Image (cartoon, grey):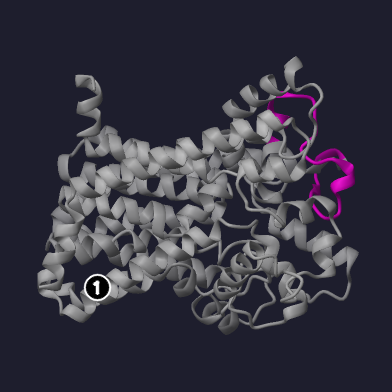
Amino acid sequence: MSSHLRRWLADPLILLCLAAGLLAFVVQSGELGTADTMHRLQTTHWLWTSEPQVFPNEYPEFGLHGRGGRLYSWYGIGQSLLMLPTDLVGTLIAHQKIFSGYGDDPAVRSIVVSYSTSILVNVLTALVSFRLLRQLRFSLRESVLGVLALLFCTTQLHYTQNMMENNYILLLTLTGFSYQYEWLRTGNRRALFWGSAALGLNLLTRLTTGLDVIAGGIFILLVLWFERVRGKELWRQLLGYCKIAAPVYGFFLLIDRIYQFYRFGSFTNTYVSLFAKEQRLADPTLPWNFPWSTPFYQGFLGPFFKPEKSVFLFDPLLGLAILLLVILWSRLSPEVRAYGLTSLFLLVGYICFYARYTYWAGDFAWGDRYVSTSVELVALLAVPMLVSYRENMSSWIWRSGIALIAVSLVIQLASLAFWVPLEIYQMETLGHPTIVIALRFKNIVAFAFGKMDTWGLNNESMTQDAWDYVHITTWNFLPFLLRRVGAVPGWVVNTAFALWGAGLAVLLFVCGRLLRMVEWQKLLVEGRQ
């Protein structure tokens, strides 16, 4: 083994990046995961080709009429910009002669985009979350375990496979918090600029991430408050923050508004008002306040208690993090208190904002996708706090925490097994309420033993779209999907399986080395004593 390789294998940060990249590699299906991301990729294609943002045959299911009567996508442009470099490369590769006879899904272009983008986002998320945990004064061991828990034991893992905008938003928010906090500690204005730029860039992806922008300021304010900074010094710090952050936020908001004006001829409206107008014209029976027609209490309580979407079921580490914040509050450092309260504020803020939204649960998604990013921000603290303060908690809390980590890992791994619409189709005949997590485990067992029909888990809705049926009746990883579609030669399928197996083996090796490096077995023994 060369000296360079030995040094790399001894560096926990390099191993974390390897683990994040390999994890994103082995979980890919080659598909983008949802129609939302496919539409955003089409906007990416529109940026540099003559193709439209929305094809006429997609309307009225998708698209809104804008300036000149043309159809435009209703999404922000943030994720489309993220995918631009890989779309250029993917399109170039797809046009090579070797792929001229292949036109089936998963398409070559989507394979390149999903693999490249997901790996990049996952590696950067590992880096910035490790950086932030170290800034919050967690030890190397606690930070490594915290990042691994984020990657493997939260819905971050599901959205690594199904490339919606969630993980990109999480990356930018973590980056914003980390660099703005660096400014607070060092006075480095460049750090504040880049932290504000990361949070501002979020506005181009989803305008509701204005809540993340607000949260960045609240985080800084709470750190100062818990450190008993008052009076003129507090105002001086806040004024210094606003002088740099406010113009940066204003710049990105202006870009978003210019893009809105280009499409729909207005600087002040959002796509929701236009969507509501077109939908009410098509269906006059819709309520006057569509799409804000859900009673507030239903949309507020649903993310907590509804079996199909409960954040506590899909992200069990959330409950652990909240419990530890409560019982350890007096022992926590000011910055951890500030981060914990800020992330909880963000979670409640998102739930309140979407509570009256007709589609508050995010429709075709694993869990409640509108709040999953803020849930992951809270859950990031769970494992570091559990490990750091194990001597200050009772044995039952420690053991319950370890059990919750194990349960979380199993749930997130199960989320990868099938394409996300499977249970949504099944609930059309199974009815509501349905505990989706339990149904997913039932599907895994049924599919593995060929009992889907026997157990009544197949229905007509699953077969109405031929591609959907192919996608949801195989394990949701690229080699299995290629074999199921049957559009490529056998040697391609075998090569895909070989690469997938090799990637999985190396991932297990890297994770094992990381865990040995932080002496996790010794940690468990110490925790039981």
**Segment tinted magenta in the rendering:** 43-68
Q: Residues within 10 Å of mark 1 (few under 14, many from 20)?
A: many
In this orientation, does residue 402 appear? yes
Residue at figure coordinates x 87%, y 76% from the top left: 285
- Residue type at mark 1? Leu
Please identify the quarter of the rendering in which residue 457 is found. Answer: bottom right
Q: Position of residue 84 (x, y in %)?
A: 60, 29
Q: Read off the residue under disc 1.
A: 324
168 displayed left or right of 87: left
Q: Position of residue 249 (x, y in %)?
A: 44, 43
Identify the element where label 1 is drawn: helix
Q: Nearer the viewer, residue 476 or 282?
A: 476
Residue at figure coordinates x 73%, y 46% from the top left: 484
**Residue 316 in the image: above or below residue 252:** below
- The residue at the far top in this view is 97
Q: Nearer the viewer, residue 432 or 369?
A: 432
Q: Position of residue 282 (x, y in %)?
A: 90, 64
445 displayed left or right of 233: right
Residue 520: in magenta span: no
**How many numbered badges does the structure rendering display?**
1
Residue at figure coordinates x 62%, y 51% from the top left: 476
